[in-house]
Image: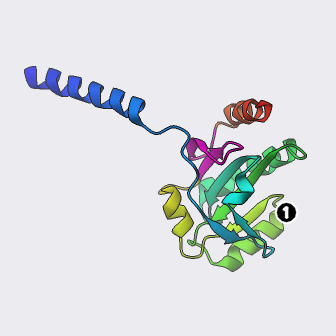
Amino acid sequence: MKKTVILAATLIVAALLAVVLWPKNQPAPAFALPDLNGRTVSNADLQGKVTLINFWYPSCPGCVSEMPKLVQTAKDYAGKDFQILAISEPYDPLESVKNYAASRGLPFAVMYDADGSVGKAFGTKVYPTSFFINKKGEILKTFVGEPDFAALYREIDKELEK
């Protein structure tokens, strides 16, 4: 019993320290990738825009399931300082990524992380994973799996007002 109480207290203290000491608004890792049109997209493109970076790949069921909602989000915020960047991880060949993007008319930049280094720099381990980034290029929130899009819209609106 005493060991259980000590363990519980230790876990509570550790959790509180993690919340207090966890770095807030860390800058997005440096990256530069060509999009499917050959234009290089990098951290410089994050400045001045609220951004959702989505890590995905075409044969990922969860990724494919959320993609229409990402397309709708891009359309809903067209003309505003918001962008979606879709980075496909190398679990599928580049041709599959190109075919998927073309057949669905994805209205945002799609990049192919051929060696997985950008996904690794962001720490992605589960797909889809999205990073919500402010106009300063700082990560505000990470969504593992499909985001709650109603909550995401509230976050986007809040950041666009700043």
When the figure is inspected, residue 128 is found, relative to residue 5, above or below; the finding is below
Snapshot quadrant of residue 14: top left
Snapshot quadrant of residue 95: bottom right
Disc 1 residue type?
Gly
Residue found 72% across the figure and 65% down from its top: 41
Most extreme residue toward the right is 79
When the figure is inspected, residue 59 is found, relative to residue 72, above or below; the finding is below
The picture places residue 33, in percent across and down from the top left corner, at 67, 70
Snapshot quadrant of residue 86: bottom right
Q: How crowded is mark 1: few (under 14 residues within 10 Å), some or many (20 or more)?
A: few
Can residue 107 be seen in the rendering of this structure?
yes
Residue found 73% across the figure and 51% down from its top: 47
Residue found 84% across the figure and 58% down from its top: 107
The picture places residue 106, in percent across and down from the top left corner, at 81, 60
The picture places residue 153, in percent across and down from the top left corner, at 74, 34
The picture places residue 114, in percent across and down from the top left corner, at 59, 76
Residue 144 is a magenta residue:
yes
Most extreme residue toward the left is 2
Residue found 72% across the figure and 43% down from its top: 135
Q: In this view, does 36 lie to the left or right of 130?
A: right
Q: In this view, does 102 lie to the left or right of 34?
A: right
Colour scheme of the picture: rainbow
* Start-end of magenta stretch: 129-147
Q: Is residue 35 left or right of residue 115?
A: right
Residue 134 is a magenta residue:
yes
Q: SS at mark 1? A: loop
Identify residue for label 1: 105
Label tally: 1
When the figure is inspected, residue 132 is found, relative to residue 100, above or below; the finding is above
